Image: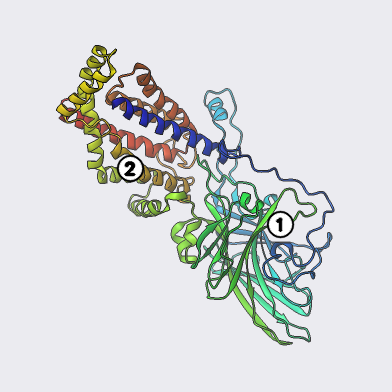
């Protein structure tokens, strides 16, 4: 039974290593060991036309077809930059697209690969000069942009391909001001004029977007306004996570709740979302950050997620997610307005929940959301008292150890008993090495006499695994820990320890735990028990410092508890 327990632990540990390595490979853009590599993006040859008819990103969303031409290559365009205390946004007058959004309060991190880091540590490689730059969401490199426009008339209407004119006004949030606005006006297209007004507020990552639709023609029109996010299918790492966080579109409604769609599923035409609702939002998610179109008022809307046709000058595939709203019928000379909010910023869970129902779900906790959310709540409350995220991680592990004390104590008592009877078991194995059946009978007799459960040390540990895996996801996904310092050399908990001190300490504590545990009867198995912490410790060299701190703290507290129980039971 001892060997069975060892084997089970070894299998679980080995599979964990394999899954962690597979996740790390996928996170860094390598194919998974368990699924074929996704098809490579094919560059579109110059001159390939976009799909005819309505703007390509909303074909299939219930619109009429065969109206708006593709934009001319030389369409007039001006880039306008609006600056606030938390956003620097670039708006293209061609369609009024938001084509760039910098977050000056969130800077890029220096995070070299492990080899370069080791060479720099020992002086064989010079550390390059690194100047942190603001994190960028919308950007030309990923064809990532926020677009809006009109469709639905018998003739073409103003779309994201229509040149617009910017009204003069301030372009920077002035001292003492709470907001700055940008007004863009389209020419009449199909007898309809579109006025788009962006409102940027102090301290806010939510941008107000007002669409004023004016029927300047001679016939009634029933326009539809679309809001969409477009980007390519590349993965955004956003930090040093060892498992891949989700990158791609998401749709939320009260009816269908939160639905994510991978780029691979879009390629395979496996998009299965609730298309009709009276509430909800769409989003593009990446590690730590997200963008989203929000319309909180109750109004019928149609969701879409699709791959865009190849376009001239665009390399690779692009994807879109969005919503379409049908506006009231406008008589000649009438007008109407539609209000929306564009969010572009960090996944700060408490702030997201205030913007729209369910928006906090863009923070990727994986399959353990039900456990991760209360753990983050506790982590956030602790940070409110402590003020340092590193010590907050330590405090959280301490609280979890206290809460699970008796469950752990049961496991450690079982291990202590196994260690106490280990010499007798070893003697039996030597005496009955040629009589396995009798050996098993005598071993079970010893276990009954000493009231030892051979697998008693495993079950309590397995019961806790979901809790600690959920905590892993919390630490990986929490943007508040990005570039958060702890002490001394740990200046960023979201990247690797620059000197690998924490991983080495974690490895040492893991080896000490092996010494505390009862030895395996099989010498080869015992060697493997010593090798595993070393292999696991080496893997931790590439993990974020916050995760290693969590594991190290857990190890230290586990050693203290097991040492105390061993002493109480007289086991050396």
Q: What's the distance in space between the residues labelled 1 and 2, CA to CA?
A: 45 Å
The quarter of the displayed image where residue 124 is located: top right
Q: Is residue 343 visible?
A: no
Locate residue 471, reporting x and y percent.
Answer: 39, 46
Nearer the observer, 330 or 134:
330
Whether residues under marks 1 and 2 lie with C-beta atoms below 8 angstroms apart, the answer is no
Locate residue 171, reporting x and y percent.
Answer: 65, 65
Q: Residues within 10 Å of mark 2 (few under 14, many from 20)?
A: few
Badge count = 2
Q: Please tell me whether residue 205 is drawn above or below residue 498 in the rendered image.
A: below
Q: Please tell me whether residue 163 is drawn above or below residue 135 in the rendered image.
A: below
- Circle 1 residue: 308
Locate residue 42, reporting x and y percent.
Answer: 74, 45
Q: Secondary structure at mark 2?
A: helix
Q: Is residue 27 visible?
A: yes
Locate residue 73, reporting x and y percent.
Answer: 83, 59
Nearer the observer, 86 or 436:
436
**Mark toward the start of the polypeptide (1 vs 2):** 1
Viewport quadrant of the C terminus? top left
Q: Residues within 10 Å of mark 1 (few under 14, many from 20)?
A: many
Q: Which mark is residue 107?
A: none
- Circle 2 residue: 464
Q: How is the image coloured?
A: rainbow
Nearer the observer, 325 or 139:
325
Q: Please tell me whether residue 109 is drawn above or below residue 318 in the rendered image.
A: above
Viewport quadrant of the N terminus? top left
Q: Residue drawn 70% across and 43% down? A: 40
Residue 122 is left or right of residue 555, and the answer is right
Q: Secondary structure at mark 1?
A: loop
The quarter of the displayed image where residue 453 is located: top left
The quarter of the displayed image where residue 161 is located: bottom right
């Amino acid at each position: 039974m001892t060997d069975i327990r060892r084997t089970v632990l070894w299998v679980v540990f080995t599979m964990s290593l394999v899954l962690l390595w597979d996740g790390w490979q996928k996170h860094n853009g390598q194919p998974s060991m368990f699924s074929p590599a996704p098809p490579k993006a094919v560059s579109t040859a110059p001159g390939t036309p976009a799909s005819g008819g309505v703007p390509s990103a909303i074909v299939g969303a219930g619109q009429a077809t065969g109206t708006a031409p593709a934009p001319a290559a030389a369409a007039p365009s001006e880039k306008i930059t609006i600056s606030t205390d938390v956003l620097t946004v670039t708006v293209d007058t061609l369609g009024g697209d938001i084509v760039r959004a910098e977050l000056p309060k969130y800077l890029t991190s220096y995070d070299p690969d492990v080899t370069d880091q080791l060479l720099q540590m020992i002086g064989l490689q010079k550390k390059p000069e690194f100047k942190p730059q603001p994190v960028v969401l919308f950007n030309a490199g990923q064809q990532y942009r926020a677009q809006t426009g009109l469709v639905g008339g018998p003739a073409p209407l103003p779309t994201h391909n229509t040149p617009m004119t910017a009204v003069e006004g301030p372009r920077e949030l002035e001292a003492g001001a709470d907001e700055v606005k940008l007004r863009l006006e389209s020419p009449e297209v199909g007898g309809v004029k579109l006025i788009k007004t962006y409102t940027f507020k102090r301290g806010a990552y939510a941008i107000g977007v007002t669409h004023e639709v004016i029927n300047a023609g001679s016939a009634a029109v029933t326009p539809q306004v679309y809001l969409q996010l477009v980007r390519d299918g590349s993965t955004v790492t956003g930090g040093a996570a060892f498992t891949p966080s989700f990158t791609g579109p998401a749709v939320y409604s009260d009816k269908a709740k939160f639905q994510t769609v991978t780029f691979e599923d879009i390629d395979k035409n496996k998009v299965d979302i609730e298309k009709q609702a009276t509430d909800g939002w769409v989003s593009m998610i990446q590690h730590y950050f997200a963008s989203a179109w929000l319309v909180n008022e109750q109004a019928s809307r149609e969701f879409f997620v699709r791959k865009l046709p190849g376009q001239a000058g665009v390399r690779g595939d692009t994807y879109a997610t969005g919503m379409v709203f049908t506006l009231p019928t406008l008589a000649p000379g009438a007008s109407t307005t539609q209000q929306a909010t564009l969010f572009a910023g960090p996944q700060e869970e408490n702030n997201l929940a205030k913007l729209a129902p369910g928006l906090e779900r863009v923070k990727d906790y994986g399959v353990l959301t039900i456990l991760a959310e209360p753990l983050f709540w506790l982590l956030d409350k602790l940070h409110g008292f402590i003020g340092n995220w590193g010590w907050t991680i330590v405090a959280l592990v301490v609280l979890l150890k206290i809460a699970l004390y008796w469950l752990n104590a049961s496991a450690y008592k079982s291990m202590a008993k196994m260690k106490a009877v280990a010499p007798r078991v070893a003697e039996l194995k030597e005496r009955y090495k040629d009589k396995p059946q009798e050996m098993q009978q005598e071993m079970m007799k010893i276990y009954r006499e000493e009231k030892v459960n051979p697998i008693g040390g495993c079950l309590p540990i397995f019961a806790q695994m979901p809790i600690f895996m959920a905590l892993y996801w919390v630490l990986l996904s929490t943007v508040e820990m990005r570039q958060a310092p702890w002490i001394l050399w740990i200046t960023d908990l979201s990247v690797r320890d620059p000197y690998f001190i924490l991983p080495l300490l974690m490895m040492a504590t893991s080896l000490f735990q092996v010494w505390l545990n009862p030895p395996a009867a099989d010498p080869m198995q015992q060697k493997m028990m010593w090798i595993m912490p070393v292999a696991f410790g080496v893997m931790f060299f590439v993990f974020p410092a916050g995760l290693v701190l969590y594991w190290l703290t857990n190890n230290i507290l586990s050693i203290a508890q097991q040492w105390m129980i061993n002493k109480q039971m007289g086991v050396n």
